[in-house]
Each structure stands twice: as C-alpha cells, then as structure tokens.
Image (spheres, rainbow, N blue to C red):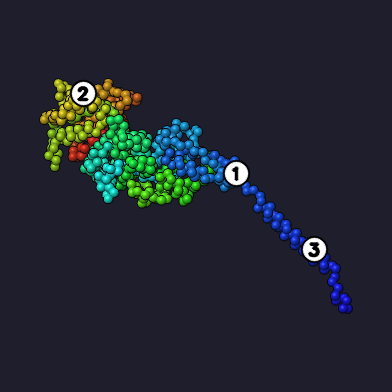
Amino acid sequence: MGRHGLTQPRWRNAVLTLVVVLIGGAVAGVAWFTVDRLQQPEAKCANPVVLNVVAAPDVAPVVDKVAGSLNPEDINTCYRVEMVVRDSSAMADQLARANGANMPNVWLPDSSVWLRRAREKGATMVPDTGSSVASSPVVMALAEQEASKRGWPQKQLTWSDVLGAGGADLNVGMADPSVDSVGVSALIAIRAVTTLTTDPPANNVAILRKLSPNAASGASELFEKADAKGQGNTAPLTAFPTSERALLDNNAKRKDEPLVAVYPDPPAPSLDYPYAVLPSAEDAAIAAAKFRSALLSPNIGDSLAGAGLRFPDGRVPGTPPADNRTVVRLLRPVPAPRTAELDQVLNVWAGITRSSRIQAVLDVSGSMNGVIPGSGKTRMQVTLEASEQGIKLMNPRTKLGIWEFSTELDGDKDYREVIPVAPLNEAIPNGALEKLRAIKATPNGQTGLYDTTLAAYQSARQNWEPGRINLVLVLTDGRNQDKKSIDRPTLIAELAKLQDPNRPLPIVFIGIGPDVDTSELAAIAKPTGGQQFSTADPNKINEIFFQALSRVISGKS
C-alpha cells in the first residue's frame, strides 16, 4: 500500500504538460497578434482633394501658414490647399465676368464689401456673407510729429482732430473707395464726424472734396505719398485712412517714420476677411468646411499676430506691440455696410470725383423776394448762398451754366443766360461767383416754369457731352404762372420726345417754400428719369440742395 501511495499516475503528467503547452502557445499567439497590429502602417489618403483658395494679400500669410501645417495624406484631412493671392476689387470683377466658370472653391477678400459688390455686378453665386477669420480696424494714420502737436500720447486723438478745423494744416490723403474697402469705411467714418455739425451734408462733401485730390488706389500708394522725401513738388501726406494691419507693417519697416493710429469714434466698419465658400463639388465643399475650421482654431493666434491681424472678435493675439501707436484693447468689429448704405456713400464720392455738365436755372420771380421768418433773409438770398456753396463743392472740371427765369425777361422769353456753360476752373476766375451773387429777383415777375424748363432741356440736349453726367437743375419756389406758355401735358410730351437712352439727361427740381406743387415737379421730371427735392421751409434749402446735389452728380438721379 505504501508503494501504491508513492506512485504518480502517468495520465496526470500528460495533462499538465498539455495545459502548459496550450497556455504558452496562446500567450505567444496573443503577443504575435499584438505586435503584428502595431507594426501595420496607418491608413493614408491616397488622393487628397485640391482646395483652390483665392486670398487677399493681407490675409494670405495666415492662409499659407495654416495650409502648410496640414498633412494632406492624413485620412482625417485628405485635402491640400492651393492658394492664389489676388486683390479683392480685381477678384470681384473677375467673378462677375466669369459667370460661374473657373471659380475657386473659396474666396477670402479683405472685407464683406466685396462679396456685395461682386453680387451687384452679377456674380450671384457669391454669398452675401462669410465667416470672418480675422479683423483689422480702419484707422487714420497720422505722422507722429503731427500727432504730438495735437497732444498725443497724453490725449487720445479722434478723426475730428484730423479732419476738423484743428487739422486744416494737414495734407490728408484718401483710399479710393471704388477699389479699396478701407476707403468705404473712411466714407462712413467721415460722415459720422460731420453728423453733429451745423450743416452735415455740406460739411461731409467739403471734407471729401479736400481729400479727393489725394485719392490713391491702395495702401502702398498712400504710404509712398507719405514718404518724408515726398515726390517731386508734391507735399508728402501727413494723414490718411488705412488698416491697423497696414500701419503696423509700415512701422515695422520704417522705424524712422512711424505713424500713429487714430481710431474713429464712433468706430467705422472693420476689415472682416470673410471666408466665402463658392459652389463646388461635394468633396471640395467638405474640404472647404474643414479648412474653415482650421482657420477658426483658437490656436491660430500666432499666425494672426505675425500678419498684424486681430481675432475675428477684435482681440489682439500674441504679445501686443511694444509702443503705444496702436491700441491693444478689445475693439469689437463693426459690420461692413449693407448694399443700400454702400451705394449711398459711393454715390456721394462718385459725384465729387466725376465731372458733370449742369445747366442750372434759377427762379427770380417776385415771390423769391419773400422774407423767410426768423432768418431776416429772402428766398433769393438763401438760394444764391446754397448755390454758391454747392458750386464750391463741385469737381473743378465740372461744366456749369446758369440761367435765370421769371416772365418776359428777354422780350417774350421767360429766361436769359447769366453765366455761359464753362468748366468751373475757368468760370470762377472769370467772375462766375460775382455774377451769381449779383442775381436779383424781379419785383413783379411771375413764374414762367413750363417754357423755361423746355428751353433749358432743349439746349442741354443739343449740347450733351459724353464722358460727363449731363443734367438740368431747376430751382423754383412756385408753380407755372405764365398764361401764354405751353401747358403741362404739352411740356411732358415734348420732353418725352427728346429722350435718348444712350444719352441720359435727367431734370432735377429743387422746390423751395410752401407754394411748390411737388406732384407737378415730379410729373415733369419723370419722363427724363429725373426727380424733385422739395422743402416747405426755405430755411432748409441747404439740406435739400446738398441732398439733391450728392444724388444727381453721382449719376443716380
């Protein structure tokens, strides 16, 4: 029995051996499987989508840096960016001409202004808005020496310090708003500066008139004009609107000629760098959405700082500039103007910079001798004063002629010429303003409106000039009183016969006082494509006159 107790069964040893072998094999198998999986290459994107992006020069460095950080072969990326740098104004024109062909997948202009301008020109595939990927306030760049004279840095300067009476000695430039979105923002800022003045329309136009000779097509031209050495006999600019980004760039390159940023109050529309996705194939649209997310990443601060841009919400990224020529506080971006406001400010600018041919006709009937209550002036006096101010604000190349009218001023004629049509830069030195001031109302004269209007229109039609805004401007305080004249239906019919769609010639009436029949003036102007502006209060003649002037000389009558 003792021998039986000491002996091990053979089958048990076999089982133990088998278990050890199986366990060891299983462990080895798991280890082999795990190592094999870890050594497998990661899945790659075999055919990355090409995302075509057109970017404005300001934001192109940011786009390039973010695009360069992407791995197109990453299965989660699977696209690469091909960028073209293009001026925003030129790209808006290109999209309008393309009519949907050869478009990029993404357009990044410097302002939403260009999205709206492109749509206005017929590029309806362009969205009205886009996601802002950066921002830059529009500022007035002021020579540091001039800023110091005006109390900077102890005083925070405003645009009124530059454009008001205190800036009369400055040579101020302007960015052409027809090709530069900075100019559009400047127009809005200037209008805000003049809002609280005694005569906002007149003062707004006066400032723009001062700036227009120094208009430049872009920032680089303005900075060149501000060079201390000047160009020839041209005095260097001492102030001009630009973006904060461009000013920072200038100060980094020209440390001996730094400029101080003067911020508008209230703020003007900022450059907002909208990310506009254009109609694309599905794979490109997906890539566009991914790239937009990359550009909006919170980690993009270094890229924005390197380009002198702010975050879309107006924060300054990275380490703020060491000097105090720009402000580093949060500046909430102001949206770009909508189409209606954009048209309005551009119309005013176009009128100032574009020359016209104006046949003006002034009412000198007896009622113009009426004294305006509370002013001590007659209707004639305020009309002449408003006319003179308007003339001074017109483009010097504008051609202007002036008639006066009542009844039987020249034999049977109700009208006569006071100043023949001539360019203002010739007429004014030859005494045009003195002749204007000498006009007097006829004590017993009536209002010969119909015959005069037709005669003035016939003369303007006969002398219509290409390349100019041609129009007839009639200022009156009453309705037709000449019983010998043609009637209104005949006048309207004759005006209709004289229309030529290739040679527009609107009549613009400015009605003064309570006796004006506004519906009649509107009916007469209608067949010519013109309109009437009237006020029952002659004290408001300036306001109405400049409203009409800014409208008609822009070609938007």
Question: Which residue is drawn at the image coordinates 46% and 37% (left, top)?
Answer: 85
Q: Position of residue 514 (x, y in %)?
A: 19, 38
**Amino acid type, residue under disc 1 in the picture:** Cys
Read off the residue under disc 1.
45
Question: 257 or 474, which lies in front?
Answer: 257
| SS at circle 2 | strand
Residue 501 shows in this picture:
yes
Read off the residue under disc 3.
18
**Amino acid type, residue under disc 3 in the picture:** Leu
Q: Position of residue 218 (x, y in %)?
A: 37, 36
Question: Is 513 located above or below residue 153 in the figure?
Answer: above
Q: Quadrant of residue 474?
A: top left
Q: Quadrant of the C terminus?
A: top left
Q: Earlier in the sequence, mark 2 or mark 1?
A: 1
Q: Is residue 181 left or right of residue 60?
A: left
**Amino acid type, residue under disc 2 in the picture:** Pro
Q: Position of residue 365 (x, y in %)?
A: 15, 30
**Discs 3/2, front:** 3
Identify the disc placed on residue 19. Answer: none
| SS at circle 3 | helix
**Discs 1/3, front:** 3
In three-dimensional space, the C-alpha distance between marks 1 and 3, rounded to whole angstroms, equals: 47 Å
